[in-house]
Amino acid sequence: MSTPPPPGERIAKVLSRAGVASRREAERMIEAGRVQVNGQRIGSPALNVTGADRITVDGKPLAPPDPPRLWLYHKPAGLVTSAQDEKGRPTVFDNLPEGLPRVMSIGRLDLTSEGLLLLTNDGAIKRRLELPSTGWVRKYRARVNGRPQDADFAPLRAGLVIGDEKFQPMQVTLERQQGANAWVTVALREGRNREVRRAMEAVGLVVNRLIRISYGPFQLGDLGPGAVRELPRRVLRDQLGEDAVPRAEPGGQRAGTKRPGGPPNPPPGKGGKARAGGTAPGPAPAPRGKRRT
């Protein structure tokens, strides 16, 4: 007979849900000796803990986990999607509005790309939405240099092979010509590194502007550059299910209350409804001024 697993959850998962760090970062903190359980320093993340265990990080008691939350963020071009950048470039997290708790990005947008970036305080939601098996479509609007014809995108629709990488078929719609450039809408499910740019380069086109307009059911809509909007919990439950976003318990912590050992949580954004569904994108954005690169 197999031995039943010990009760509780892995310590790194508990730290991630409490907003201390991502699960991977939490594992590194544990290996560095920064975490104690019941007064004993631990050196391995292979440990299950329960609510009865006393956990401290750098000598400070672990705060109760916040409920899972999700924000829409309009990433401007010129920001790196990482907590720190070895080249000293400005990051997404340096430019978020004051008052947000510690958040993680769901996926990435490269330095010169802009548009919808999802942020969450919950490591489990981050992993769930990044998995290819989720199957959510990411939509982009790309401005390419040249005068492409619809037939030029046939290789992208069939599924490209670049080197030893095989890209899944993309949905590509040629929208309109604008001077020396054309606007194209691209929908894909994988989200590989620089996938849209590399795919366009493979058919002889250079992308000079790239905007993500949706991630699954969540859409950029009229959210302005640099702005953040929190989604209501009911929207998260509708899209992710009760297992991912359980209903708040009576007397449980709510937005606007102070977390032990931390700043007050900001209340949900006003009018922060996600627009779900496959609505067509609006007209191409007008070109803006020079950006940092």
Image (cartoon, rainbow, N blue to C red):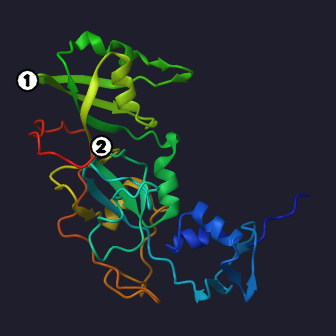
Q: Is residue 117 above or below residue 237?
A: above
Alpha carbons under labels 1 and 2: distance apart: 21 Å
Pick out the residue farthest to the right: 1
Q: Marks 2 and 1: in contact by CB < 8 Å?
A: no
Residue at 25 percent of width and 63 percent of height: 228
The part of the image, by quadrant, that contains residue 37 is bottom right
- Residue denoted by label 2: 112
**Type of amino acid at the residue the image marks with label 2:** Thr
Residues 164 and 171: in front is 164
Q: Can residue 9 be seen by looking at this rendering?
A: no
Percent across and percent down for residue 14 are 60, 72
Pick out the residue farthest to the front: 87
Residues 112 and 187: in front is 112
Q: Is residue 151 above or below residue 89?
A: above
- Residue denoted by label 1: 179
Q: Can residue 65 be seen by looking at this rendering?
A: yes
Percent across and percent down for residue 183 are 18, 28
Along the horizontal axis of the image, is 214 left or right of 182? right
**Type of amino acid at the residue the image marks with label 1:** Gly
N-term-proximal mark, 1 vs 2: 2
Along the horizontal axis of the image, is 143 left or right of 69? left
